[in-house]
Amino acid sequence: MVEQFEKRLGYSFKNKQLIIEALTHKSYKKPYNNERLEFLGDAVIDLVVAEFLYKKFPESDEGVLSKTRASIVNEQGLSKLAKMIDLGESLFISNAEENNRGREKSSLTSNAFEAVMGAIYLESGLKTVEKIVVDILNRAYPKIDLKTLSKDYKTALQEITQSIEGVTPEYELVGSRGPDHQKEFEVRVSLRGKELAVAVGKSKKDAQQKAAKIAMDKLETGE
């Protein structure tokens, strides 16, 4: 399983334990898991994506670049990159997570993607991570476009509801869960007291953006 993943990744680990750790979810109940590597990979990917956008869009200002980076490195964005290399298929997860379709969960695949890049960074350095991430980015976004990538769903939803209903949507924090270093927030978006969508994210803003996107999709399809 690991060897096939390395082929899809385009990188072969000298230290096999490092990649095994990166692919191991805490539910697998081993003495190790990928949370520490995830912490490291998060910072590495932020830097790689920032430099990628800085070079690719030389005319863009800091605000646009920041929004664009945020849309790539959030849970959904990283999950999309993880799918490009079928990362979910190679995760070590518990039977409970397996039965709960854990291999398809964006929270698991995005975290594991960060962990894998953290592992590569430890073994081969930043340049190797950059080469791999940029290759995956180019495959995931063949026609990369700042306007699409930096889409602010909260603003877009507000524009829609104001034009149709004459009111703005309201966001409510439903709850939070998880340890401080890996907290998840659940947010509900409503219009005139009627629930439009609920979503979970790594931050309140992330959850709000996800809820706004779900709500927009529902409005556009007439649900």
Image: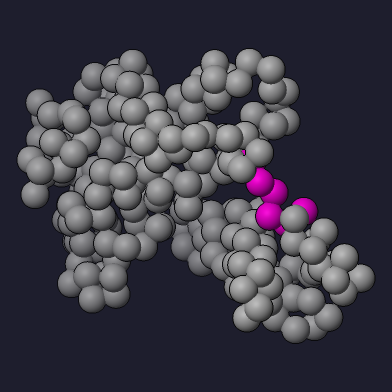
Residue 42: image x %, image y %? 44, 37
Quadrant of res 153? bottom right
Q: Residue at x 66, y 69 (%)?
A: 220
Taking the image as shown, residue 173 lies to the left or right of residue 83, namely: right
**Residue 49 is one of the magenta-drawn residues:** no
Residue 120: image x %, image y %? 26, 28
Q: Is residue 72 above or below residue 105?
A: above
Q: Residue at x 10, y 43 (%)?
A: 4
Residue 214: image x %, image y %? 60, 67
Q: Is residue 3 visible?
A: yes
Q: Is residue 102 above or below residue 135?
A: below
Q: Is residue 178 above or below residue 218?
A: above
The extreme bottom residue here reads 194
Q: Is residue 176 visible?
A: no
**Residue 153 is one of the magenta-drawn residues:** yes
Q: Residue at x 47, y 62 (%)?
A: 178
Quadrant of res 67? top right
Q: Residue at x 13, y 29 (%)?
A: 12
In magenta, the rendered stretch is: 150-155
Residue 195: image x %, image y %? 70, 81
Q: Is residue 185 above or below residue 222?
A: above
Q: How many numbered badges does the structure rendering display?
A: 0
How is the structure coloured here?
Answer: one colour
Depth check: give the residue in front, 219 or 98.
219
Quadrant of res 139? top left
Quadrant containing the C terminus in the rendered view: bottom right
Taking the image as shown, residue 146 lies to the left or right of residue 163, namely: left
